[in-house]
Amino acid sequence: MPKLSQIIDAPHVDQRRLIRLLKEMYGENEGKDNFRVELRLNRYKIYALDDNPRPLTEDQIRDLQAKRRR
């Protein structure tokens, strides 16, 4: 059963970078990701299948912020 490991309140997250980072952190098992992400109202809920989930650091979250183009 996945455990809630972190909630990220960030309206401008680069979703591709987030998924890539989570795959690096939690990996895959038999072709399936060891995590789940829910997005609702600019809030990302990350659920890990790990017994000891590691939350993203503030620096990692800041790096995920999508750069707004002008």
Image: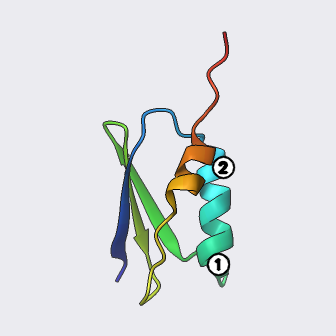
Q: How many marks?
A: 2
Q: Position of residue 66 (x, y in %)?
A: 61, 33
Q: Position of residue 69 (x, y in %)?
A: 67, 16
User: What kind of element bears circle 2?
Assistant: helix
Q: Residue at x 64, y 78 (%)?
A: 28
Outermost residue, bottom side? 51
Pick the residue in front: 55 or 33: 55
Pick the residue in front: 65 or 46: 65
- Please say which color scheme the image uses: rainbow
Q: Nearer the viewer, mark 1 or mark 2?
A: 2
Vertical placement of residue 53 versus 21, above or below: below
Q: Dot 2: within a 10 Å radius of its alpha carbon, few (fewer than 14), some, or many (20 or more) residues?
A: some
Q: Residue at x 37, y 37 (%)?
A: 42
Outermost residue, front side? 59
Which kind of residue does numbered mark 2 sit on? Arg
User: What kind of element bears circle 1?
Assistant: strand
Quadrant of the snapshot with the C terminus: top right
Vertical placement of residue 53 versus 38, above or below: below
Q: Which residue is the site of mark 1?
A: 28
Pick the residue in front: 37 or 64: 64
Quadrant of the snapshot with the N terminus: bottom left
Which kind of residue does numbered mark 1 sit on? Glu
Q: Quadrant of residue 68?
A: top right
Q: Quadrant of residue 40?
A: top left
- Label 1 to label 2: alpha-carbon separation: 16 Å
Vertical placement of residue 38 versus 53, above or below: above
Res 17 label: 2
| Apparent side of residue 51 relative to residue 57 in the rendered image (left or right) | left
Q: Residue at x 65, y 77 (%)?
A: 27
Q: Position of residue 9 (x, y in %)?
A: 36, 44
